[in-house]
Amino acid sequence: MPVRFRILAVLIVLSFVNYLLRNNISVVIPSIREEFGFSNTEIGWILGSFNVSYTLLQIPGGIFGEVYGPRRAMAIIAVTWGVLTLLTGFAPSLLAASATGAMVALVSVRFLMGIANAPIFPIMVGTTARWFPTGGWALPNSLSSAGLTLGQAALGPIVTLLIVHFGWRESFYLLAPFGFLVGAWWYWYGRDRPAQHPAITREEVELIDRDRDLSFSMAVDAGSWREVLARRDVLLLAASYFCMNYVFYMFAQWLFTYLVEERRFSLLESGFLYALPFVAGAVLAIAGGLSCDFLCRRIGARWGCRIPAMTGLALVAMFMWVGVHAVNPYTAVGLLSLCFGFTQFTEGAFGAASGYAGGAHTATVYGVVNTGGNAPGFLAPVIGLMLDRFGWLPTLASGSLFALTGAALWLFIDVQRRLPRTRQVLRSPAPG
């Protein structure tokens, strides 16, 4: 197997473990609420504390990855996920003299978890742009997205079984070591650039560098992130990604509670049904990546990224609307699974567009795009308030409007113009 695909395999496992550790709290919410009596609004503040730090540190996270290199940066944050997952189980007990104390503890740990998670996807997209040939970025990014959606899918059955047999705190203790293991694995096998890997051949390095824009062999100037912030196409990508992830966050943070409270499934049944949208997401993420790469090679990056993104977002709007209005609960789960699946269909286009627009600055560009994509996390308390005031149907149906807006924004995005400000450096020699 070519080394670039082995690197991708480790990145997929990193994505899987990342979502297993960062979002396990979404399955634990009913248990936490039962113990401490939190309202949906208060749960929204706990979820939102992660979202605030995670979103605000996307751009610094991309810069962190470019400065320290993917190998060191990713290993550091993965180990930190494990430490903070342990603390999520311990912290409420330390301040559990009152529900307020438990809430403060959970908000604090989740805020720190957001900091530790912020760099992962800017670094991952930047690593993909370094390790794969031009025109072949969408599929690797989609496979990474498939890894995260499978991690989210695994949460339902795994965490539910751990809660039933051991308790909700113990579910965090038992999952935490995966962060330590995957961080060590990445540091052992990963490298910042293809030419640095001892197992790679000259032919594979030449294949990766073929047709590569000159900016990839240039060093990033200090302050280049300011140019990134000023790029019209990058900001429009971020705005469209915001609209798509408004729907994503509803699934990632509220789906399990929706199945238990609105659709009246049992805890165990909800755990397994919860996995279906994310399995659909993994399959459609791969389909979207293949489509995007094929179209980019045939008709260019502008429409090659635009067509799968707009098609996916239009289908997200349709399936969200009919899913929340479905009377039969199993029909609703099926339609909502397709809704979420098509959010992931668009991921390859967003990742590839960041690479085309960013060149050597891809990690920072994706930091900007992912800042927009995770800004819906700020709305977690608002979503909780909407649920308390208006109920599930209008709250979830609002996702259709955001998806259609995100699709329309792609008409104004041109990802074929690159960032100009770089200085040339020599390439590392390819191994013999």
Image (cartoon, helix red, strand yellow):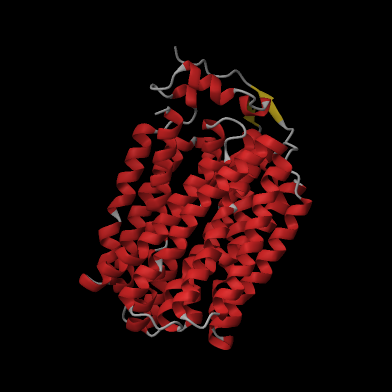
- Above or below: residue 38 compared with residue 241: below
- Above or below: residue 324 compared with residue 183: below
Q: Nearer the viewer, residue 326 or 128?
A: 326
Residue for point 24% across, 73% down: 164
- Above or below: residue 37 compared with residue 129: below
Residue for point 57% across, 19% down: 427
Q: Quadrant of residue 275?
A: bottom left
Q: Is residue 1 left or right of residue 294?
A: left
Q: Is residue 66 left or right of residue 357?
A: left
Q: Nearer the viewer, residue 48 or 145?
A: 145
Looking at the image, can residue 405 be seen?
A: yes
- Above or below: residue 198 compared with residue 224: above
Direction left: furthest residue: 165
The N terminus appears in which quarter of the rendering? Answer: top left
The C terminus appears in which quarter of the rendering? Answer: top left
Image coordinates of residue 376 in percent, x first then y, are 60, 65
Image coordinates of residue 212 in percent, x first then y, are 63, 26
Direction bottom: furthest residue: 389
Residue for point 37% across, 80% down: 265
Q: Nearer the viewer, residue 28 or 100?
A: 28
Residue for point 32% across, 66% down: 157
Q: Nearer the viewer, residue 108 or 370?
A: 370
Direction top: furthest residue: 432
Looking at the image, can residue 222 be seen?
A: no
Image coordinates of residue 207 in percent, x first then y, are 54, 22
Q: How many marks?
A: 0
Image coordinates of residue 37 in percent, x first then y, are 38, 85
